[in-house]
Every structure is written in C-alpha cells, then in structure tokens.
Amino acid sequence: MEGPAYGQTLRQLTLWTHHVLLPVYGREVTSTAPWCSRWWEHPEAVAQLHGLWLAWGDLTGPKSPAVGPASWHRDYLSPVMASLRDPQGPFAGCKPGMHRPKETPSIDAVDPFGPPPSPGGAPR
C-alpha cells in the first residue's frame, strides 16, 4: 500500500488507536511496560497495531461470530500488547514525553541468493 490509500489507512488506524484501543486497553506506562506517544514512528508498532486493528474489524463487527470479541482479546490483543509493551520491544528507551528512534540492524550489501560476484569483487 502506498500514496493516498496508505495515508488514509494510517489515519483510520490512528483514530482507532487513539479513540478505542488506548482509552480502553492503554495501561499505565512504566519502565517494565513502555509506550511511546509517537508510536507511529516505530514501524514495528505500526505493523502490529495494523494487524490488531484488522482483526478487531473482523472479529467485533456486526457479522462476526458471538465468540469473536473473546477470540480477539485472547488471540490478538493480549499477545500484541505484550509484545509492544515488552521492555525490549519497539518502545524500549521511550519514556512519557520522550521518543527515542531505534537503530535497525545492519545488513551486508551482499545478496546471499543472487549470482556470485564477478572476478575482482564487483557485482555483475
């Protein structure tokens, strides 16, 4: 997804996160359960929250099964919130009112499944 569709999806995710998820499930922020007020700047958090939001839509809507909300809580909400709020998770180092960008792991510029390098080391 990209362009206007991506922007609209992020807007909907933000509204859901700020007006549904956090008011109901946003427990107190502590050093052992961090949260970043700039969660949208953490790609892992956006990916996990997007999946959580999609599951919420499928499992809590008018056509969802009667056990849908219970399944959403057990199978989606609890694992995602535990992952996001883990002290080593995406918000590690963030504190209330302070966002800390994360360094991503470095990746060698070699394509491990591409053609072998040409003689002299330059890629083909």
Image (tube, helix red, strand yellow):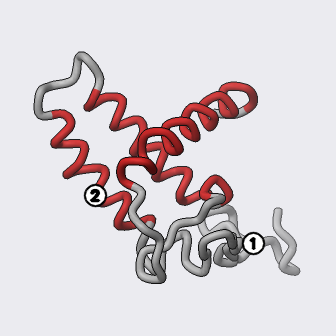
Furthest residue toward top: 63
How many discs mark residues in the rendered view? Answer: 2
Element type where label 1 sits in the image: loop
Instruction: Give residue 2's position: percent from left, percent from top.
Output: 70, 33
Above/below status of 6 relative to 78 = above
Instruction: Give residue 45's position: percent from left, percent from top.
Output: 53, 57
What is the quadrant of the C terminus in the image?
Answer: bottom right
Instruction: Give residue 107's position: percent from left, percent from top.
Output: 68, 75
Q: Quadrant of residue 69?
A: top left
Question: Residue at label 2?
Answer: 78
In the foreground, 100 or 105: 100
Element type where label 2 sits in the image: helix
In the figure, is residue 118 to the left or right of 110? Answer: right
Mark 1 is on which residue type? Ala
Alpha carbons under labels 1 and 2: distance apart: 37 Å
Question: Residue at label 1?
Answer: 109
Furthest residue toward left: 66
Mark 2 is on which residue type? Ser
Q: Residue at x 49, y 73 (%)?
A: 34
What is the quadrant of the N terminus in the image?
Answer: top right
Q: Give the mark, 1 or 2, whose residue is nearer the N terminus.
A: 2
Q: Residues within 10 Å of mark 1 (few under 14, many from 20)?
A: few
Q: Residue at x 46, y 52 (%)?
A: 48
Q: Which mark is residue 7?
A: none
In the foreground, 108 or 14: 14
Q: Nearer the viewer, mark 1 or mark 2?
A: 2
Q: Quadrant of residue 121?
A: bottom right
Q: Quadrant of residue 51?
A: top left
Above/below status of 1 relative to 98 = above
In the figure, is residue 102 to the left or right of 71? Answer: right
